[in-house]
Image (cartoon, grey):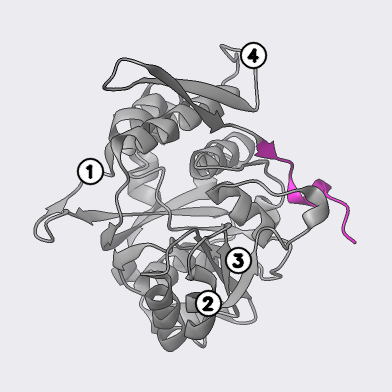
Amino acid sequence: MNPDAQGWYERNTSSSDDWPLERVLSLKGSTTVAVIIPARNEEATVSHVVREIRNDLTDLVDELVVMDSLSSDDTASEAERAGARVCSVGDVRPDLGVRPGKGEALWKSQFVTNSELLVFVDADLTCWGTHFVSGLLGPLLTEQRTLLVKGYYDRVMDMGSGVSTEGGRVTELVARPWLSVHRPSLSAVVQPLAGEWAIRRSVFASLTVPVGYGVEMANLLDVESRHGLEAIAQVDLGRRAHRHQNLHDLGMMATELLAIADRRRSAPTREETDSINLPRLSHDRRWTDRTVVTQERPAFESIDQP
């Protein structure tokens, strides 16, 4: 392993067991915390995620917001009934337009929250715990130099038994190999694409944000580039399960990640565009294109506020 990555891992990796709720509450003081849950068509799981946070973390979480990303089901109403404040990306600063995608939901969450620390949690979790939130907050509350905290976990297999230490197909086949080749100092980040992570609001506001799945990779690369490796920590959160995507959707995710990461290399290898066509050969041997959006939103701090 790259020696810088190895040293970082030993200094900056902890377990959620190191951050019990009582300890995190004692560290919180007057610091404000927002938990933000991006959701698109997650009516089956979003209420459980919201309800667990509401029940267990009342004294820790100041704002609990579900960012509804143009859902066509009852995601918004289920989240609201469970106790979240629900904001649709279409209703938040409509003058700036609206884009489909996870990154768009996270970017727009900055317009509807005020807290100093932002914790992002996916809406499709089926095996998890509220220690995800307290664990991610621990390093931010104890060390001012820590700006970004990434979670990692064992993944419960589809059959519901056994675990895998692999971070997922796109993580293991695209994200981590890319980091090992182009940013080896980050090669000890176990799951760079984890949907559970926390960041200081002031830092997130300074970053451009890809509107789609590239948001996690982009913020990891940008924080290290601007603030150095020691600004990043990671926490072992135990086990996690969620809904899996099909192979073709994962191909689109991988394409976006490569495009977003490529922009952050010192010498980009291709002309930057806001979208890429990903061709697919069907069973009847016809080519079809799927459009992969690679657009990025400007830094929140650069946007004029009404």
> Closer to the N terminus: mark 1 or mark 4?
1
> Closer to the N terminus: mark 2 or mark 1?
2
Type of the residue with mark 1: Glu
- Who's the residue at 37% across and 77% down the image? 48
Kindly check if marks 2 and 4 are in contact, taking CB atoms under 8 A apart as contact.
Answer: no
Q: Secondary structure beneath disc 4?
A: loop
- Residue at mark 4: 271
- Residue at mark 1: 166
Q: Magenta residues?
A: 296-306
> From the viewer's perspective, is 205 left or right of 292?
right
Kindly check if marks 3 and 4 are in contact, taking CB atoms under 8 A apart as contact.
Answer: no
Compared with residue 63, is residue 243 higher up or lower down, i.e. above or below? above
Quarter of the rendering containing residue 191: top left
Q: Position of residue 151 (x, y in %)?
A: 38, 55
CA separation in Å, label 2 and label 1? 34 Å
Q: Position of residue 145 (x, y in %)?
A: 58, 54
- Residue at mark 2: 77
The answer to whether residue 2 is seen in the rendering is no
CA separation in Å, label 2 and label 4? 42 Å
Between circles 2 and 4, the one closer to the viewer is: 2
Q: Secondary structure beneath disc 2?
A: helix
Kindly check if marks 3 and 2 are in contact, taking CB atoms under 8 A apart as contact.
Answer: no
Type of the residue with mark 3: Leu
In the rendered image, which quarter contains the N terminus?
Answer: top left
CA separation in Å, label 3 and label 2? 26 Å
Q: Secondary structure beneath disc 3?
A: strand
